[in-house]
Image (cartoon, helix red, strand yellow):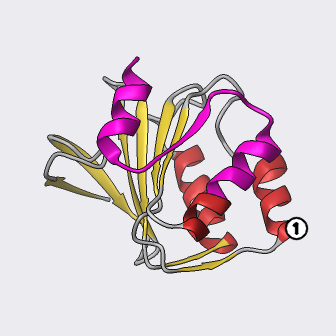
């Protein structure tokens, strides 16, 4: 865990504690905004998502009803199979059904992954956006 000033945008604004999880991801828990922002790296596997979930669940600042912004825009290689999507939705996802979730994507592969999670979680409060700013506006609404 490291403390650093992170530039605004992407849910990583002002002075926050950034939790790097190797090259695969980093996340911030913003208690004041009741928000978790995670940014995944170029290569994303089910193990990376499991690691993120475990770290998040062990973080004393995290609450399952917080909102989440998932930044997938840097993901170039997405190595998830159909069974992985089911496992993520049913067993790994640490957020409660009433938590607002925003996925930020820039291409069709990222969009497909976000849509799969939305469909499998059967929640109406998961949305997909093309920019962090749009996601933040929706989360704040």
The magenta stretch spans residue 116: yes
Say which quarter of the image contains residue 36. top left
Q: Is residue 46 among the parts visible in the rendering?
A: yes
Residue 43 as seen in the image, left or right of residue 134: right
Residue position for label 1:
83
For the C terminus, the image quarter is top left
Residue at the spot 41% in from the left edge and 50% down from the top edge: 130
Q: Nearer the viewer, residue 44 or 107?
A: 107
Q: Residue furthest top?
A: 141
Q: Secondary structure at mark 1?
A: helix
Residue 44 as seen in the image, left or right of residue 92: left
Magenta stretch in the rendered image: 113-141
Q: Is residue 34 among the parts visible in the rendering?
A: no
Q: Image height check: is 97 above or below 111?
A: above
Residue 91 spot, x, y in % from top left: 81, 50
Q: Main secondary structure of the magenta part?
A: helix
Q: Residue furthest front?
A: 108
> Dot 1 surroundings within 10 Å: few (below 14), some, or many (20 or more)?
few
Residue 121 spot, x, y in % from top left: 78, 40
Q: Nearer the viewer, residue 141 or 69?
A: 141
Q: Image height check: is 72 above or below 32?
A: below
The magenta stretch spans residue 62: no
Residue 129 spot, x, y in % from top left: 46, 45
Say which quarter of the image contains residue 73. bottom left
Residue at the spot 29% in from the left edge and 40% down from the top edge: 133
Q: Image height check: is 22 above or below 117?
A: below
Q: Nearer the viewer, residue 13 or 129?
A: 129
Residue at the spot 81% in from the left edge and 46% down from the top edge: 120
Residue 31 as seen in the image, left or right of residue 104: left
């Amino acid at each position: 865990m490291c403390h650093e000033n992170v530039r605004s945008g992407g849910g990583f604004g002002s002075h926050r504690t950034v939790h790097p999880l190797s090259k695969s991801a980093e996340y911030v828990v913003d208690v004041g905004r009741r928000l978790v922002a995670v940014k995944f790296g170029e290569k994303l596997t089910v193990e990376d998502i499991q690691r993120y979930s475990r770290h998040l669940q062990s973080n004393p600042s995290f609450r399952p009803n917080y909102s989440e912004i998932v930044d997938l825009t840097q993901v170039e290689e997405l190595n998830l199979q159909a069974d992985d999507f089911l496992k993520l939705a049913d067993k790994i996802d640490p957020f409660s059904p009433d938590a607002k979730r925003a996925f930020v994507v820039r291409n069709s592969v990222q969009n497909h992954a976000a849509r799969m999670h939305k469909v499998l979680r059967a929640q109406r409060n998961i949305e997909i956006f093309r920019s962090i700013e749009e996601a933040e506006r929706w989360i704040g609404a």
